[in-house]
Amino acid sequence: MYYPEELVEEIRERNDIVEVIGTYVKLQKKGSSYFGLCPFHNEKSPSFSVSPDKQMYYCFGCGAGGNVFTFIMEYENYSFPEALKYLADRVGIKLPEREYSEEEKRQQDLRMQVLEINKMAANYFYYQLRTESGAQAMQYLKSRQLDDETIKRFALGYSSKYSSNLYQYFKSKKISDELLKESGLFNVDEKNGMYDKFWNRVIFPILDVNNRVIGFGGRVMGDGKPKYLNSPETIVFDKSRNLYGLNIARTARKKYLLVCEGYMDVISMHQAGFSNAVASLGTALTEKHATLLKRYTDEVILTYDSDDAGVRAALRAIPIVKRAGLRARVLHMNPYKDPDEFIKTLGAEKFQERIDQAENSFMFEISVLERNYDMKDPEGKTSFFQAVSEKLMEFEQELERENYIQAVAEKYHIGFDNLRKMVNRSAMRAIGREVPKSAVDRERKEIRKKSQDDGMKQSQRLMLTWLIDKKGLYAKVKPYLDADDFTEDLYHQAAQLLFEQLEKSELNPARIINHFEDPETQKEVASLFHAKLNLQSQAEFDKALNETLRKIINNSIEFRTKNMNPADIAGLQKILLDRKKVQDMPKITYQM
């Protein structure tokens, strides 16, 4: 639903960001800002800053940043409407009701009813585990060395050996068969009618990141088939979009997430203190899973079984997580089969050592590739290095590729130059011709250009930060600088909004963030207002200010010159005037 900007701004202004974040993070005032340990990554020294003046937060360690809406969206995994409602409720503002279509109302009502049925079922299973009929299931969990606290934390339960008990329970609550069918908890056939999908099983409730029960997994007692059974897709459950244990792992605030294969691996790892473990739900890791992981971390450690199936699963997962922008490492558990077995045998401390030693995903792929070759045979060894050289071509950037060539060369004692020559020959064969020397030169130029671009972005970030932090600076640079001088698209949009505010003397950087809907974009905009440059004296600042201002204007002139229509006489005249203006620009001073 669309809410008026004035209402959104009122809700933001009524929710002081220091107070809101202070309920989640212990903050300590330092100067004009508050600092604490970042809730979005693992750190020992506080780099998480909350500014009451800007009504923004920013982490100088991981780059997380935004206004009070962004924080609630990121921390609670809320959509913007959910964050808006949460903050409106917090300060007693009633949001206008949205007009839903009849179909939307029906679907929303159905979702809420299915969630309620799931909650009732979870409570029912939880109770059954603690009855006499659940003794076998409880004994099974105890045999897996789970303590009472862990069993409670994961709300583990039991479905009795009779396939109609849950159905009869719901019928006693006067719930219709039509609604029960939508829940995915029951099967229906002509012979038996409606009966329980889960019976004689240990039950693992599946919760989403907002701690709502969306489905169930069940492990059979005895030798029944299948050994593990999961809820089917329902209106509230999509197994490709959810991960078991993520509701807990997302609050662990570790710098990585451990991705494993099953319920018991997650549970035993959490019990051992590794509360950042998650697992996919009876399916291989998907693109949607990887996108979900990216919301909470930049690195995953694949903690799959050490058997052939686990190795294949890791090989399938590596390109998926990389495409999502995640770093990937692979944990080795040999000679043990899975995390559960490893931890029970060697303990949590040894398991942490294995985590610390987790292998770079590319090097893991190489080590698996090695198994296909006889490394004692000269021909087999040569074929292996040929295959490796072709795989090293995956890295497009020369610097990254050479780093990996060096790592592989050191591991296999082949010699850096020898392996690099093989990679170059593979590249030549791949394109069917010699790679000209100019190709290397072009790549080096591209690296230099990227460095220059990064330097220009930093200059523009510094100027935007100074314009917010230093009252009166805008008046001094206004004759020479305008929003069009910020050539990066996002920087230009932010500069336009900021300059409009400065013109009206209504500086409000937190409001600027509200103009951008995507949390990642909000995070990037926040970074534009938190650039840092360590300057010790007035002279240093004046020098940096003038150099930065000239750099931005000259870059703008160069950008417009390259992109100008030759027939645009007015544009050409403005460029000439701007060149003259920057040449004649006096030294600008600003009292720090």
Image (cartoon, grey):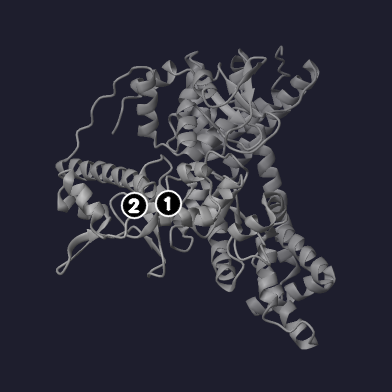
Q: Is residue 220 left or right of residue 298?
A: left
Q: Judge whether 7 appears above or below 291 on screen.
A: above
Residue 118 picture location, percent across and down: 30, 46
Residue 297 picture location, percent across and down: 57, 45
Hey, which residue is sitting farthest front in the picture?
Answer: 132
Mark 1 Cα-neighbour bin, 10 Å: few <14, some 14–19, many ≥20? many
Q: Amino acid at mark 1?
A: Asn
Q: Mark 1: which secondary structure?
A: loop
Mark 2 Cα-neighbour bin, 10 Å: few <14, some 14–19, many ≥20? many
Q: Tags 1 and 2 in contact by the CB under 8 Å rule?
A: yes
**Separation of residues labelled 1 and 2 (CA atoms):** 8 Å
Q: Is residue 28 visible?
A: yes
Q: Nearer the viewer, residue 529 or 208?
A: 208
Residue 112 picture location, percent across and down: 26, 41
Q: Give the mark nearer the N terminus: 1 vs 2.
A: 2
Could you tell me which residue is drawn at 53 percent across and 27 percent down? 24
Q: Nearer the viewer, residue 241 or 398?
A: 241
Q: Amino acid at mark 2?
A: Phe
Task: Determine which residue is flagged by label 2.
Answer: 237
The quarter in which the C terminus is drawn is top right
Q: Judge whether 476 appears above or below 231 on screen.
A: above
Mark number for residue 134? none
Q: Is residue 423 left or right of residue 479?
A: right
Task: Determine which residue is flagged by label 1.
Answer: 242
Q: Nearer the viewer, residue 248 or 121?
A: 121
Q: Is residue 477 visible?
A: no
Q: Quadrant of residue 160?
A: bottom left
Could you tell me which residue is drawn at 15 percent across and 41 percent down? 102
Q: Mark 2: which secondary structure?
A: loop
Q: Judge whether 142 appears above or below 68 on screen.
A: below
